[in-house]
């Protein structure tokens, strides 16, 4: 549903009560830096975190390099008083954040409601949606296509595991992940996996990041900058993939057919969309590396 193609391989959270960490998170250069007003903030601190976060974005928005990390704010659930207060504050902000991350999405109606509210302000605000409940998983196809603002789904594995009454292991959550892969692919948006929580188990992070990439996820969260190189390596197109995508796209552009043989393999025209996506992400990464 969105034509915005950019790398969303990794993200870091910064608590809304710890904005002194924001420059460090930006300097670590993940694809997304998200200020958290939800899980990281105690109920008594929600109002203060909201105010300081929006004040921070009012200063940042005018000077942030668009080629740098994507900047978001994770608000509270729309089904809570804090979430409604977050949205109201965003609509009243002089320079709101360019994107919002919406947690615990259970139905497409939540997304449509937020979309309609944001239509009333002049600033374009993108959305990323966290699926972390059984209800959200059941409705994920409709949720993914509920608004043209939506750039990605995110998998909330810890909350999902609690709902399913299982440990958050790969095998226990594989069905949830693959269902979300289909929903995101059908909506032509990204799908970002839950962070790997064991900071000392880099081998485990390697295995899980590779497994996520293998089933079609496009990124994974991080809890520390030292996880970023591993994550980004698994979700970045390789030189071989880029070269192959160039050969396929050039061959189809030069031929008037829906079927070609490239590198000895029969290729049908529908594969072009994924190949153009590889090239678009590779170009964005190249531009970023030249800054």
Image: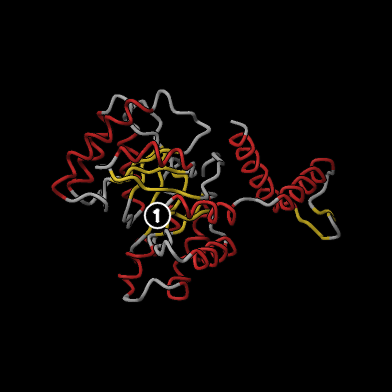
Left or right relative to 40: residue 183: right
Residue at 36 percent across and 38 percent down: it is 22
Q: Is residue 61 visible?
A: yes
Q: Which residue is mark 1?
A: 223
Residue 50 left/right relative to 202: left
Horizontal and vertical percent for residue 239? 72, 49
In the rendered image, residue 21, in percent from the top left (x then y), is placed at 34, 41
Q: Does 74 appear above or below 210?
A: above
Q: What x and y, as percent, mark residue 152?
A: 46, 49
Q: Within the image, what quadrant is residue 149 found in?
A: top left
- Quadrant of the rendered structure where residue 55 is? top left
Q: Residue at x 54, y 67 (%)?
A: 207
Measured as percent of width and height from the top left, residue 231 is found at: 53, 55
With respect to residue 61, does 77 lie above or below? below
Q: Quadrant of the C terminus?
A: top right
Residue 282 or residue 232, whichever sits in front: 232
């Amino acid at each position: 549903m969105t034509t915005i193609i950019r790398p969303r391989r990794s993200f870091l959270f910064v608590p809304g009560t710890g904005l002194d960490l924001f420059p460090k998170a930006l300097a670590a250069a993940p694809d997304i830096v998200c200020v958290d007003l939800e899980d990281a903030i105690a109920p008594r601190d929600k109002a203060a975190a909201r105010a300081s976060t929006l004040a921070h974005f009012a200063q940042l928005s005018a000077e942030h390099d668009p080629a740098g990390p994507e900047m978001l704010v994770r608000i509270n659930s729309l089904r809570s008083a804090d979430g409604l207060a977050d949205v109201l504050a965003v609509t009243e902000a002089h320079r709101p954040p360019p994107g919002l991350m919406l947690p615990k999405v259970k139905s497409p109606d939540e997304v449509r409601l937020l979309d309609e509210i944001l239509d009333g302000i002049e600033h374009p605000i993108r959305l990323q949606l966290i699926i972390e409940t059984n209800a959200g998983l059941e409705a994920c196809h409709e949720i993914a296509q509920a608004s043209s603002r939506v750039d990605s789904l995110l998998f909330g594995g810890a909350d999902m595991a609690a709902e399913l009454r299982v440990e958050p292991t790969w095998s226990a959550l594989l069905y949830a992940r693959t269902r979300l892969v289909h929903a995101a692919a059908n909506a032509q948006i990204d799908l970002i996996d839950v962070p790997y929580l064991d900071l000392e188990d880099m081998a485990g992070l390697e295995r899980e990041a590779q497994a996520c990439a293998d089933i079609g996820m496009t990124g994974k969260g991080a809890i520390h900058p030292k996880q970023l190189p591993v994550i980004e390596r698994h979700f970045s197109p390789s030189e071989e993939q880029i070269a192959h995508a160039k050969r396929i796209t050039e061959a189809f552009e030069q031929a008037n057919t829906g079927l070609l043989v490239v590198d000895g393999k029969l290729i049908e025209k529908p594969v072009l969309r994924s190949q153009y996506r590889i090239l678009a992400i590779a170009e964005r990464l190249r531009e970023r590396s030249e800054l």
